Amino acid sequence: MRRAFATILTLSILTTFLFVVVLGLMLAFGVVSLPLAVGLVVLVQVGLLLVGPTVNDFLYGCTPRNRRVRRF
């Protein structure tokens, strides 16, 4: 499980880095405006934030049926 999590984490970091580099080049050449570039980066980060817990649940087998809550 740790290897799968590390792989997904590494791929998401590399994908985000590549996206920001391409977006920076587009911004430098005047293809996109600064507000649009910032908005796209924020959308990608929010998307990763929303998808992250679902990926962790999938990796660790924590489905709604077998989710256990510890009571202290």
Image (cartoon, rainbow, N blue to C red):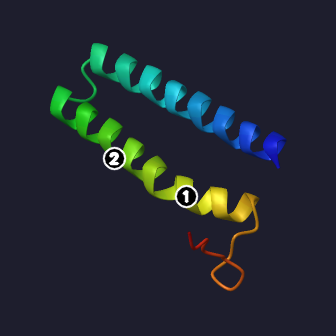
- Quadrant of res 11: top right
Residue furthest top as drawn: 28
The label number, if any, that marks residue 53 in the structure image: 1
Query: Tag 2's secondary structure?
Result: helix
Across and down, in percent, residue 45 comes to: 40, 42
22 displayed left or right of 53: left
Give the residue displayed 36% in from the left and 19% down from the top: 24
Across and down, in percent, residue 35 comes to: 16, 33
37 displayed left or right of 62: left
Residue highlighted by disc 2: 43
Query: Of tags 2 and 1, which is closer to the observer?
Result: 1
Amino acid type shown at disc 1: Pro
- Quadrant of res 66: bottom right
Distance between mark 2 and mark 1 Cα atoms: 17 Å
Give the residue displayed 40% in from the left and 44% down from the top: 44
Q: Looking at the picture, does residue 32 appear above or below residue 7?
A: above
**Mark 1, other Cα within 10 Å: few <14 / some 14–19 / many ≥20:** few
The label number, if any, that marks residue 29 in the structure image: none
Q: Looking at the picture, does residue 61 appear above or below residue 33?
A: below
Amino acid type shown at disc 2: Leu
Q: Looking at the picture, does residue 11 appear above or below residue 18?
A: below
Across and down, in percent, residue 68 comes to: 66, 76
21 displayed left or right of 66: left
Say how many tags the image has. 2
Q: Looking at the picture, does residue 17 appear above or below residue 36?
A: above
Give the residue displayed 44% in from the left and 50% down from the top: 49
Across and down, in percent, residue 1 comes to: 82, 50
Which comes before the other along the chain, label 2 or label 1? 2
